[in-house]
Image (tube, grey):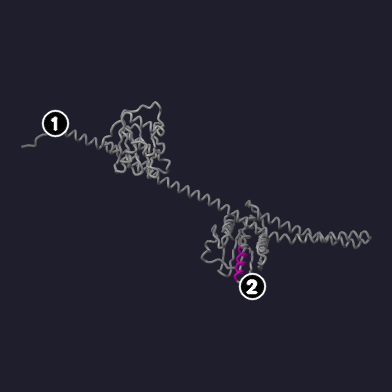
């Protein structure tokens, strides 16, 4: 017997089943497409401010999937305060956008009580059905948050759905019950929103951390600027102490010769009154010689004051022809007398080996003066510390040497102090690093010096040392920087 042909009824039933299967596949494809579009946008988020835009895409997909809600929004749990932060979607330029409403106490209305209960039972969503006056009372309760128009008309029956993700809920208010299929879609959308919100939190933490780092960096820069100013003021203090000593000598000569000239003038007047012209002329010659000495020492005092102003004022970076030997010699004496002003018992031997054939070179004299003064101050400090340790058996010696080099010059400042320990030799030019006790150094002197030489003058600053015996800092300055 042949196989029996299907009846018309059976064919219709088969076609209906196939059509339903195809419809279900098409629906699933729509859902997958909607979910993927949201996932792609979530992955593309680069800062936390994009949350509203990304969320809007999710709620737009509800309309694409023909889940037409009266109102949609998001609730974020605030466990500590037993509250929920409500976000509501509103229409703006024909798009759904998310705006934050306010914090709502979770016990303000039965709708939220249902949410609490469903969450405790680990259900995927909560549903509250309100009818008649219950709807009106809900809106009256929420009027502060929803900012509804006074003419708002209420449905006779509304269905309040809250679909859970880890940190909160996706909320939809419907005028009809959602089907099992629609609830399944909403559950999947809530899970996707959970990914969006996790991404948002991660970006927020990253941005906060970045802001903290930037704030810390700004604070560090401000502190560094203050410390640099402190370093300059400390150098100025040492400079001023040295200048006070240096300027006293020529002032003493000026005062002494002025007093002598006053006496000589009285003698000359007496001789002239007595008619002794020859004696008066000899006294006049003495007065002239004394005036020449007054002028010489006055000019010496003037050069010291100019040197002080040159060292103390802020550098303009302007380069000018400068006598390196004179600069090095002056800084050596000023540094020494600056330390002597602090400790009268301190003495050190100063040796110079200055190349008289050195040409003048173009440098910023204020900046190079600060560098050389800082190196001398460090050298005298080192030998002073060693003197305290070894006593009279030790003779402190600080030496400065200048020399002509190919296409430039060198300034070498050497001391027979304690030297630099090998373990810190690589750190001495780093900002804020110092081997001095707390309160005696900012750790910026050598760092500033290194920058001035290398960045400001295209030169080099090196150190050679042997712990316990000596340290020598060598500056190389090109003739054209």
Residue at numbered disc 2: 392
The nearer-to-camera label among 2 and 1 is 2
Which quarter of the figure has residue 243? bottom right
The furthest residue to the right = 275
Relative side of 22 to 116, left or right? left
Which structural element holds mark 2?
A: helix
The furthest residue to the top = 151
Which structural element holds mark 1?
A: helix
Relative side of 228 to 41, left or right? right
Q: Is residue 384 magenta?
A: yes
- Please name the residue shown 25% across and 37% down the image: 25
Residue 354 x %, y %: 66, 65
Q: Nearer the viewer, residue 215 or 264?
A: 215
Q: Nearer the viewer, residue 82 or 88?
A: 82
Q: Which of the two discs, 2 and 1, labels the residue nearer the N terminus?
A: 1
Magenta residues? 378-389
Residue at numbered disc 1: 9
Above or below — where is 416 with respect to 128?
below
Question: Is residue 358 visible to the viewer in this orientation of the structure?
Answer: no
Q: Is residue 324 magenta?
A: no
> Can you say which quadrant of the picture contains the N terminus?
top left
Main SS category, magenta section: helix
- Please name the residue shown 52% across and 62% down the image: 426
């Amino acid at each position: 017997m042949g196989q029996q042909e299907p009846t018309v009824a059976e064919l219709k039933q088969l076609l209906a089943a196939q059509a339903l299967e195809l419809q279900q596949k098409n629906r699933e494809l729509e859902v997958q497409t909607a979910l993927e579009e949201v996932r792609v946008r979530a992955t593309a988020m680069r800062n936390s401010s994009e949350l509203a835009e990304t969320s809007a895409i999710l709620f737009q997909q509800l309309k694409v999937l023909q889940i037409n809600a009266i109102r949609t929004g998001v609730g974020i749990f605030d466990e500590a305060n037993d509250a929920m932060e409500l976000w509501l979607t509103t229409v703006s330029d024909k798009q759904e956008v998310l705006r934050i409403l306010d914090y709502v106490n979770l016990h303000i209305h039965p709708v939220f009580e249902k949410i609490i209960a469903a969450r405790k039972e680990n259900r995927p969503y909560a549903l509250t059905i309100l009818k008649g006056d219950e709807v009106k009372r809900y809106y009256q309760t929420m009027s502060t948050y929803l900012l509804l128009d006074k003419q708002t008309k209420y449905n006779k029956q509304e269905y309040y759905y809250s679909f859970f993700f880890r940190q909160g809920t996706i909320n939809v208010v419907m005028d009809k019950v959602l089907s099992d299929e629609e609830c399944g879609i909403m559950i999947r959308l809530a899970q996707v929103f959970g990914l969006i919100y996790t991404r948002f939190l991660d970006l927020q933490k990253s941005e906060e951390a970045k802001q903290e780092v930037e704030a810390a960096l700004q604070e560090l820069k401000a502190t560094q600027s203050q410390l640099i100013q402190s370093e300059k003021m400390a150098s100025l203090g040492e400079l001023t102490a040295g200048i006070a000593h240096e300027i006293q000598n020529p002032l003493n000569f000026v005062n002494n010769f002025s007093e002598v000239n006053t006496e000589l003038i009285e003698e000359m007047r007496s001789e002239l009154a007595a008619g002794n012209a020859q004696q008066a002329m000899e006294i006049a010659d003495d007065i002239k010689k004394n005036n020449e000495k007054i002028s010489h020492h006055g000019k010496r005092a003037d050069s010291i004051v100019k040197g002080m102003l040159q060292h103390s004022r802020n550098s303009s970076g302007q380069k000018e022809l400068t006598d390196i030997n004179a600069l090095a010699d002056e800084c050596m004496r000023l540094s020494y007398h600056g330390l002597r002003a602090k400790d009268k018992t301190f003495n050190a031997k100063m040796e110079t080996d200055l190349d008289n054939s050195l040409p003048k070179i173009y440098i910023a004299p204020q900046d190079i003066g600060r560098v050389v003064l800082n190196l001398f101050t460090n050298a005298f400090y080192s030998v002073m510390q060693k003197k305290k340790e070894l006593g009279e058996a030790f003779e402190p010696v600080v030496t400065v040497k200048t020399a002509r080099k190919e296409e430039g010059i060198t300034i070498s400042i050497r001391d027979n102090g304690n030297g630099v320990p090998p373990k810190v030799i690589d750190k001495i030019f780093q900002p804020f690093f110092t081997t001095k006790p707390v309160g005696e150094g900012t750790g910026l002197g050598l760092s500033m010096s290194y920058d001035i030489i290398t960045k400001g003058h295209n030169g080099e600053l090196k150190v050679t040392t042997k712990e316990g015996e000596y340290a020598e800092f060598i500056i190389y300055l090109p003739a054209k920087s």
